[in-house]
Image (cartoon, helix red, strand yellow):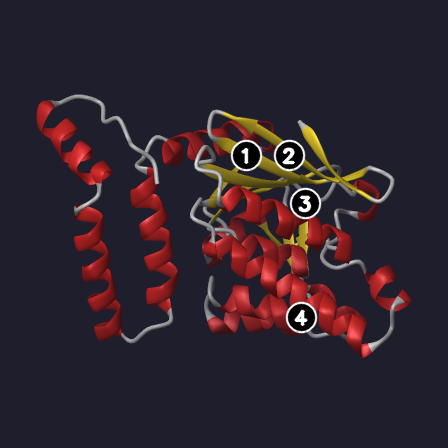
Amino acid sequence: MSAIPHQADAPILLRSDQGGVTTLTLNRPSQFNSLSKPMLEALIAEVDAIAHDSSVRVVVLAGEGKAFCAGHDLKEMRGNHTLAFQQELFRLCGKFMVKLTEMPQPVIARIHGIATAAGCQLVSMCDLAVAADVARFAVSGINVGLFCATPSVGLSRNMGRKQAFEMLVTGDFIDAHEAQRRGLVNRVVPLEQLDEEVARLAAAIAAKSPMGISMGKQMFYRQLEMGMDAAYQMAAETMACNMMTEDAVEGIDAFVAKRKPEWKGR
């Protein structure tokens, strides 16, 4: 595992690579892995690099210490109490969240502890999420007088409007099973099985065509913002173009021949 340095080589973000799966670990455990400006800058730089790395098939986002991510660094925000700083901070946060959906590789959130405010937003913006049964989720900014406006974007696209709005205006926690019921996470397992379950999901994705996954992910998010007719037109064009790729030809030929496909990459 390598450290992504920032200020006196403090490893605020860790990276490990194994078998086509890259794990990025938020490494500010004493601050509950809060999304400070330096952390967001490090994350943006790293996902930009990963997006252009064809050897990476899946990305896992994790947190060191007791928490997955407790949101923004309130001390940093209060210590830089200018409109310009707040605008830049939230612009960076939004930029990073969008990049998670724009990068060609699927991103899995590995949630072992609390995910609050922008940390809950981070879960919602990952393509997939696997949580330990001890994990808890909240958008608790309202408890300090701050409506979690930016987290509301991801939450409202993962769960029903009334469920999302209730979390936003109460700041109440929900447990992992409730988060799964509401659509915020895909899978819930005992804490001791979390790494195994994340690895199983990542391996299942890594075994598929990287070109098919990349094209499909891009189409999936774009069609969500369209009307049905436009969505079907774009989906049809995507499938037609996908059919013409080397991976689709190889995949179909392998299926007919009853052998394992050998993917060409993206």
Q: Point out the tag, 3 or 2, that comes first from the N-terminus.
A: 2
Q: Position of residue 259 (x, y in %)?
A: 17, 21
**Spatial distance from mark 1 to mark 4, Cα to Cα?**
29 Å
Looking at the rendered image, the disc whose residue lies closer to the viewer, 4 or 2, is: 2
Tag 2: residue type? Arg
- First in sequence: mark 4 or mark 2? 2
Q: Is residue 29 above or below residue 181?
A: above
Q: Nearer the viewer, mark 3 or mark 2?
A: 2
Q: Is residue 155 above or below residue 99?
A: below
> Residue 50 placed where, x, y %?
53, 42
**Badge number at residue 15:** 2
Instruction: List the residue tagged with mark 1.
Output: 22
Question: Circle 2 — which element?
Answer: strand
Give the residue drawn at x 10%, y 23%: 257
The outermost residue toward the left is 256
* 1 or 4: mark nearer the eye: 1
* Quadrant in the picture for residue 250: top left
> Which amino acid type is shown beneath numbered disc 1?
Thr
- Determine which quarter of the picture holds residue 120: bottom right
The mark found on residue 108 in the picture is none
What secondary structure is found at the residue carrying circle 1?
Answer: strand
Sequence-wise, the earlier of marks 4 and 3 is 3
Report how far apart the C-alphas of labels 4 and 3 lie in the structure: 18 Å
Quadrant that contains the C terminus? top left
**Spatial separation of the CA atoms under disc 3 and disc 1:** 17 Å
Residue that label 3 marks: 68
Mark 3, other Cα within 10 Å: few <14 / some 14–19 / many ≥20: many
Q: Quadrant of the N terminus?
A: top right
Q: Residues within 10 Å of mark 4 (few under 14, many from 20)?
A: some
Specify the label residue 148 is tagged with.
4
